[in-house]
Image (cartoon, helix red, strand yellow):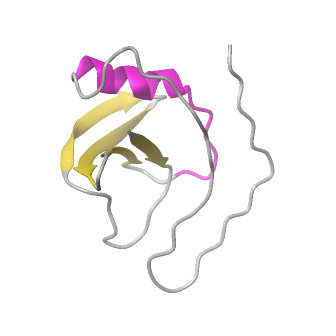
Amino acid sequence: MLGDQWDARSGATAPLGKYGSASLGGAMWDIYQGNIGWNVYSFVRRTNTTKATLNLDDFTQALVRRKLIGNDKYVSGIEAGTEVFQGKGRLDTKAYSVDIG
């Protein structure tokens, strides 16, 4: 299972099939679900932002509540970056941190 959060997007680019929505971390997110040989869940923020502090558990529990994943799943990796689908892209990062506890 792969999951990701999009804090910003432009154009018509979107992940796989739209599933629903959720209010998490003070913002509304559209949830997308698809399968590319394994299940993929994506959260796309409805309004772009340049700064975010997010609790990963909020997102995983949103999937658990919808019975998309079991409560026995765990995080095996965390990444940050950008996906450029056309034209140019840029990611400026001043800070990136993960607290587990």
Residue shown at the point (29%, 56%) measured from the top left:
36
Give percent across and percent down for residue 96.
75, 43
Residue at point 36%, 37% (across, down): 28
Relative to 31, is 85 above or below?
Answer: below
Q: Nearer the viewer, residue 6 or 67?
A: 67
Q: Is residue 59 above or below residue 77?
A: above
Residue placed at 63% from the left, 51% from the top?
Answer: 80
Quarter containing the N terminus: top left
Residue 85 is a magenta residue: no
Left or right, 24 with reference to 96: left
Q: Is residue 25 left or right of residue 50?
A: left
Residue closer to the observer: 81 or 12: 81
The magenta segment is 49-66
Q: Position of residue 85 (x, y in %)?
A: 44, 77
Residue 19 place in picture, x, y as percent: 19, 42
**Rendered-image quadrant of the C terminus:** top right
Residue 81 location, quadrant: bottom right
Q: Quadrant of residue 21?
A: top left
Give residue 41's quadrant in the image: top left
